């Protein structure tokens, strides 16, 4: 009797396996239908800080004299920047060099070429500063030039806290992807199922020129350097994939 019971249980389990087998095979062979969409989101904002690389270049007959002249001018430039409100933590040395100046004699009529000779030395000292008050940027540049800076290599604008703007762009990109996916699904006569994956890409675009009320005109009237801030764009791109029914 006990053996008969065991045989019945075994046959029942075997029957269940055979009945389930076709369903499992069908799930493995049938392709998953997917719909993928890319959403774009863009947020524009005026920059609120600037990075400026500036410095002092001095020349003299000896390296010592060139260095002394450069040091004296650079101290005045640093003092001017701090008086203008640039914090010490926002000033960083970005380049320093001492270079000889050469003269290359012309080739003589006999074809002899004399070696170059040193006629002086050039000392360059550059710093990169962060200007957090953009209304004062023109005046800062004007002041450092008056103090002795004769090298300004570039200005770049940025946003101190871009995270809230990125999050806003993410929301816009996600909403854009969902709206397009719903449109395509409706046109194709299918229904969106659960989301299978989400990924993103993002970028901070350089400032774009815009017309602004003339703070720069007021600076120009004060004989300071006129500055155009423009706008920066923070863009996010979201890739979303749905399973469709």
Image (cartoon, rainbow, N blue to C red):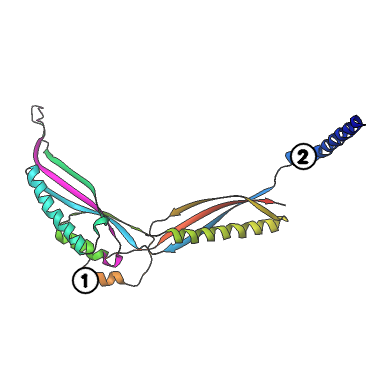
Q: Which residues are magenta?
A: 108-136
- Are there few (<14), some (14-19), or many (20+) residues within 10 Å of tag 2? few
Q: Residue at left 53%, top 60%?
A: 171
Picture disc at residue 126: none
Q: Is residue 115 above or below residue 226?
A: above
Residue 140 sits in quarter = bottom left
In-image side of 172 versus 103 (left or right): right
Residue 113 drawn in magenta? yes
Q: Nearer the viewer, mark 1 or mark 2?
A: 2
Q: Residue at left 54%, top 58%?
A: 173
- Are there few (<14), some (14-19), or many (20+) residues within 10 Å of tag 1? few
In-image side of 187 versus 214 (left or right): right
| Residue 225 seen anywhere in this rendered image of the structure | no
Residue placed under numbered mark 2 in the picture: 24
Whether residues under marks 1 and 2 lie with C-beta atoms below 8 angstroms apart, the answer is: no
- Image coordinates of residue 100 in percent, x first then y, are 13, 40
**Alpha carbon separation for disc pair 1 and 2:** 80 Å
**Label 2 secondary element:** helix
Q: Is residue 155 above or below residue 100?
A: below
Residue placed under numbered mark 1 in the picture: 222
């Amino acid at each position: 009797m006990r053996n008969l019971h065991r045989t019945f249980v075994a046959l029942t389990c075997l029957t269940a396996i055979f009945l389930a087998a076709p369903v499992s095979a069908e799930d493995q062979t049938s392709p998953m239908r997917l719909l993928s969409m890319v959403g774009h989101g863009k947020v524009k904002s005026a920059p609120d800080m600037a990075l400026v690389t500036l410095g002092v270049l001095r020349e003299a007959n000896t390296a010592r004299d060139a260095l002394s002249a450069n040091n004296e001018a650079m101290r005045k430039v640093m003092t001017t920047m701090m008086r203008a409100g640039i914090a010490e933590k926002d000033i960083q040395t970005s380049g320093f060099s001492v270079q000889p100046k050469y003269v290359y004699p012309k080739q003589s009529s006999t074809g002899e070429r004399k070696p170059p000779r040193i006629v002086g030395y050039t000392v360059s000292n550059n710093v990169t500063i962060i200007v957090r008050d953009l209304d004062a940027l023109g005046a800062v540049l004007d002041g450092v030039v008056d103090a002795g800076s004769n090298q300004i290599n570039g200005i770049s604008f940025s946003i101190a806290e871009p995270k809230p703007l990125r999050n806003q762009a993410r929301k816009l990109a996600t909403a854009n992807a969902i709206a397009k996916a719903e449109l395509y699904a409706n046109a194709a006569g299918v229904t969106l199922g659960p989301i299978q994956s989400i990924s993103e890409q993002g970028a901070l675009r350089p400032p774009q020129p815009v017309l602004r009320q003339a703070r720069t005109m007021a600076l120009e009237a004060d004989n300071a350097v006129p500055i155009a801030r423009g706008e920066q764009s923070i863009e996010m791109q979201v890739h979303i994939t749905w399973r469709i029914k």
